[in-house]
């Protein structure tokens, strides 16, 4: 039982990181209709941007977080303007392959600039809190609080601001949204900016929880897609739910199968969802 | 000496071009002809390579092996083992739209790789399977002839398939699924057939690969080498066109190897890691192709209809 709850705590932590990535991926999927394969590597780039701020200016990682978010948002918008915008009209599949190439470019750039060995934001051992039989690191609480804060911000943005409403409208019904005169190009840019910023946050949190590595984002990409699909494509709230479910399932699976199969659990949930309920838990865009 | 070294390198290169060409032809069956977005090429590649390796190597204590079957039976085994796996994968993903199919197939390919990575009794885990000999005691040159023979055979078969009524139905499904179904074709059945045939061709490529490099480990079946390069080759060569598929394999592999020389010219201090720089270059190249010439070097041409005279 103790082990179960401990794994559940780890699962919620992993789940909130996945959820942040999945919100961006699902919005890009909803508005632009393609699976963005570079999303995981965008996360990694965000994490390394924060590392640069931490090492160059000697600042704590929470101060570096907003800087990394802004830089990654700018990068995401830039990639869209330089590459994706030109091929948006050709075929969604070309976009998909192109995002695969973007993923490789980003990852190799990280390797070229920062090297391929593991890195950490802060060296030294952080003393964990012991609450009875449970172990909780202060970082975990911080990550969870920050992730919750960001999700609330996204919620307010999507429900209260004009741009957020336009974004949801485009995700729901593209043609109807365009007829009503929604500025499609600006909505797309905002989608990339928010997706990039959230990806950066997810990357930084992942780096705080474990360590930084060039493939850290790629390994989380498929769990993020799994969360996206499970939650329903184009549904930010579904993505949060999907992220938590996938995160907990991955951690809890170690009770019954070897830990090295953890990623496979996420894929299996995803494949089962695709077969039995392709619209996701919360009915998504078809 | 210089010339001899160059020739030896060219033979080595062409072997890999031929092996990749076979896999590109398999992918062309799935994507170019039927429009199935399979980015799990590495999974079938791995199944073929491991099956061949296990069937043809000498007995070993650490992993399943020691059947010591002859070369050709090993390749047949690769195809036979891949068949049911591809059938199941094709069956469960049959109803999925393009982008869902993409995500599902890459997930399945990763599960296959994790399986070979973790099931040490079968595949010796990360240490991989060594000692897969080339058949009939041939060297690289002799093996090149064998590979080219298989390329020619595969090319002929897929070209016959492309011109056949069967190939016409596949293209019809790709271009307009509803109309094909309306004219009484069992779309799901044809799709599944194309998927399985394509996957088995990839497994054949995997088997030939295992014999050529002589050693396989899960590292070789990461999405980059197993899937991405194959896709770049098909897109660059021209999807839907079998000649384009082979040409794409040649051109992209030449570029991929020349990036090695290019990376050698640039000072390491500037680029950090040579392999990362190569991946970077190939990624940029693909973006340029996609933006400027999405139809590839050799665009698809329609085969003549039966009874249609040569003009």
Image (cartoon, rainbow, N blue to C red):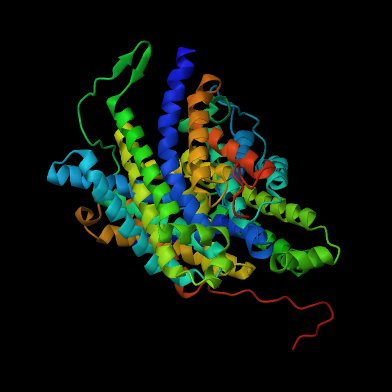
Vertically, is A76 above or below A145?
below
Residue B193 placement, left or right of A86 = right
Residue drawn where x is 35% and y is 40% of the image? A149
Residue drawn where x is 49% and y is 12% of the image? A1
Q: Quadrant of the C terminus of chain A?
A: bottom right
- Judge by depth and name the residue closer to the eye, B234 or B261: B234
Residue that extends furthest to the left in the rendered view of this protein:
A57
- Judge by depth and name the residue closer to the eye, B134 or A8: A8
Residue that extends furthest to the right in the rendered view of this protein:
B184
Res B257 visible? no
The location of residue A130, given as percent across then percent down, is: 31, 14
The location of residue B225, given as percent across then percent down, is: 48, 50
The location of residue B144, given as percent across then percent down, is: 56, 56
- Judge by depth and name the residue closer to the eye, A202 or B203: A202
Count of numbered circles in the view: 0
Vertically, is A39 above or below A5?
below
Residue drawn where x is 30% and y is 43% of the image? A116
Residue that extends furthest to the bottom in the rendered view of this protein:
B311
Res A233 visible? yes
Vertically, is B142 above or below A90?
above
Residue that extends furthest to the top in the rendered view of this protein:
A132
The location of residue A124, given as percent across then percent down, is: 20, 26
């Amino acid at each position: 039982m103790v082990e179960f709850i401990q794994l559940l705590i780890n699962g919620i932590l992993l789940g909130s990181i996945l959820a942040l990535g999945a919100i961006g991926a699902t919005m890009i999927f909803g508005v632009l209709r393609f699976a963005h394969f570079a999303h995981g590597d965008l996360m990694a780039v965000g994490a390394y941007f924060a590392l640069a701020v931490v090492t160059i200016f000697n600042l704590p990682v929470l101060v570096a977080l907003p800087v990394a978010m802004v830089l990654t948002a700018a990068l995401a918008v830039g990639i869209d303007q330089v590459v994706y915008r030109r091929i948006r009209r050709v075929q969604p599949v070309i976009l998909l392959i192109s995002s695969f190439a973007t993923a490789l470019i980003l990852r190799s750039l990280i390797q070229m600039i920062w090297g391929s060995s593991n890195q950490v934001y802060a060296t030294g051992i952080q003393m964990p809190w012991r609450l009875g039989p449970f172990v909780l690191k202060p970082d975990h609480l911080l990550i969870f609080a920050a992730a919750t804060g960001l999700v609330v911000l996204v919620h307010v943005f999507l429900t209260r601001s004009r741009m957020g409403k336009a974004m949801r409208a485009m995700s729901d019904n593209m043609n109807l949204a365009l007829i009503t005169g929604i500025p499609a190009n600006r909505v797309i840019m905002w989608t990339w900016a928010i997706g990039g910023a959230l990806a950066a946050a997810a990357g930084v949190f992942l780096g705080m929880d474990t360590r930084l590595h060039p493939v850290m984002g790629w390994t989380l990409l498929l769990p993020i897609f799994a969360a996206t699909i499970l939650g329903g494509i184009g549904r930010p709230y579904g993505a949060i739910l999907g992220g938590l479910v996938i995160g907990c399932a991955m951690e809890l699976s170690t009770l019954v199968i070897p830990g090295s199969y953890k990623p496979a659990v996420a894929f299996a949930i995803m494949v089962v969802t695709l077969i039995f309920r392709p619209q996701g838990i919360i009915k998504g865009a078809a | 000496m210089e010339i001899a070294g160059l020739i030896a390198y060219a033979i080595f290169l062409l072997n890999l071009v031929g092996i990749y060409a076979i896999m590109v032809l398999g992918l062309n069956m799935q994507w170019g002809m039927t429009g199935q977005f399979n980015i799990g090429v590495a999974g079938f590649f791995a199944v073929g390579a491991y099956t061949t390796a296990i069937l043809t190597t000498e007995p070993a204590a650490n992993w399943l092996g020691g059947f010591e079957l002859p070369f050709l039976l090993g390749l047949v085994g690769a195809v036979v083992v891949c068949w049911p796996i591809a059938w199941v994968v094709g069956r469960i993903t049959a109803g999925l739209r393009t982008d869902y199919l993409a995500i599902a197939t890459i997930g399945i390919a990763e599960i296959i790789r994790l399986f070979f990575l973790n099931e040490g009794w079968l595949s010796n885990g990360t240490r991989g399977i060594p000692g897969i000999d080339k058949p009939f005691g041939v060297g690289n040159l002799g093996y090149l002839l064998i590979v080219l023979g298989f390329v020619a055979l595969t090319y002929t078969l897929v070209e016959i398939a492309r011109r056949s009524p069967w190939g016409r139905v596949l293209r019809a499904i790709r271009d307009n699924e509803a109309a094909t179904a309306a004219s009484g074709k069992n779309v799901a059945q044809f799709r599944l057939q194309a998927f399985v045939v394509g996957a088995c061709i990839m497994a054949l490529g995997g088997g030939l690969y295992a014999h050529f490099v002589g050693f396989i480990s899960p590292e070789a079946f990461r999405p980059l080498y197993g899937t991405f390069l194959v896709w770049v080759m098909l897109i660059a060569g021209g999807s839907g066109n079998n000649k384009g598929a082979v040409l794409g394999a040649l051109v992209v592999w030449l570029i991929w190897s020349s990036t090695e020389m290019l990376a050698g010219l640039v000072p390491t201090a500037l680029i950090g890691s040579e392999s990362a720089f190569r991946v970077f270059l190939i990624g940029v190249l693909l973006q340029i192709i996609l933006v400027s010439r999405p139809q590839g070097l050799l665009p698809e041409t329609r085969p003549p209809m039966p009874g249609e005279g040569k003009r």
